[in-house]
Image: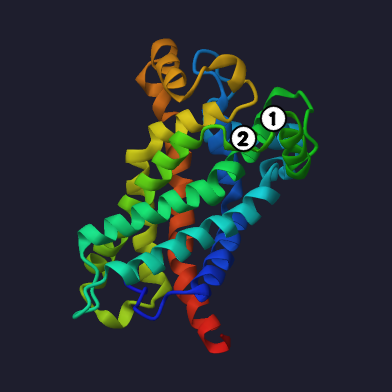
Amino acid sequence: MAFVTKKDSGCKTVVKGFLTGGTQAALTYPTEYVKTQLQLQSKANPEYNGIIDCAKKTMRQHGVKGLYRGAGVRIVGAGFQQMFRWGAYTNLTQVFRDEKTGKLSQANNIICGLGAGICEAVCAVTPVETVKTRVTDDMRRGTGKYSGSADAIVKILKSEGPLGLYRGAFPTILKQGTNQAVRMPLQVQIFSMISLGDDTKKQSPIYNGAAGFLAGCGSVLLTQPQDCVKSRMQGEAAKELYKGTVDCAMQMMKNEGPTAFFAGAIPRMVQVGMTSGISFALFPVISQLLNKVM
């Protein structure tokens, strides 16, 4: 990243990442909720006609708070997610920087992004996404199994053990690894283009946010199939419907065709673009503020 320097490493980046993630998740959760609902519905017999229809029906049945169902675990989880992402990324960049110039090559930036994505997938994203998906799927089905995120965690651990929180781990690791391997270097390239090489803009939240938004949208194109399979694997009925990740993907292709792998692509592009843009805009701002007190 343009704003990540040789000084950005250690525990401080962990705190910066947590604050960045929690803030952006609180601002963008409704788009995440709609995206998940569109992915969970059957392609053969859809409940919603699109983004707006999904939002309207949710608010009609559950009020505005329905769009924030499962948000608690997502906000805290996003804090931990970006804590692991930025913590891993900034510390890995110190390992892969050129010792003489202090610069990070494009290839090494991809490796650092990949490592950051895998770290966040294993340590935060998979359990958080599992809980969020099962709570929203429970509300969509009207089964009333969970009263909220905390209740879902307790019941999943009680009935399925810790591994119950890691359903769909493989496609999640694939998705997050690819996400960051693409997003991190892409943000750098887009930033260089829109800033016209002006180093004074490296800490600018506007330029970094704009580059982050476009990089987020670009990464969706490569990771949407993994995200769709992940959502299906983390749904309430996944254990009865699928034998595993590969079986899930094969059934989706056989029963619904290739378009099933791109269900919810537009809301996810909006959501990922927004979260990436906000994250890349917030991180340098939070960094500057924390550097004054830490």
Verify CB contact (< 8 Å) between mark 2 and mark 1.
Answer: yes
Residue 256 in the image: x percent, y percent?
43, 14
Tell me how many marks there are.
2
Task: Residue lying at the far top in this picture: please name it.
Answer: 255
Q: Quadrant of residue 27?
A: bottom right
Along the viewing direction, whichever of 92 and 265 lies nearer the viewer: 92
Going by the numbered disc 2, the residue's amino acid type is Leu
- Which residue lies at the image location 67% right of the left edge and 49% below the top edge? 73
Q: Is residue 107 visible?
A: yes
Q: Is residue 211 above or below residue 172?
A: below
At which x and y percent is residue 63?
75, 40
Q: What is the C-alpha distance between the residues marked 2 and 1?
A: 7 Å
Residue that carries the numbered disc 2 in the rendered image: 163
Q: Nearer the viewer, residue 277 or 168?
A: 168
As helix, strand or loop, the secondary structure at mark 1 comes to: helix
Q: Which residue was labeled with disc 1?
A: 160
Viewer-closest of 236 and 89: 89
Residue 264 visible in the shown view: no
Residue 3, position as x, y percentages in the image: 36, 74
Which picture quadrant has residue 198?
Answer: bottom left
Name which residue lies at 49% across and 32% down.
230
* Residue in the picture at 27% in, 67% down: 96
Pointer 1: residues within 10 angstroms few (<14), some, or many (20+)? few
Q: Which residue occupies 34% across, 79% down? A: 6
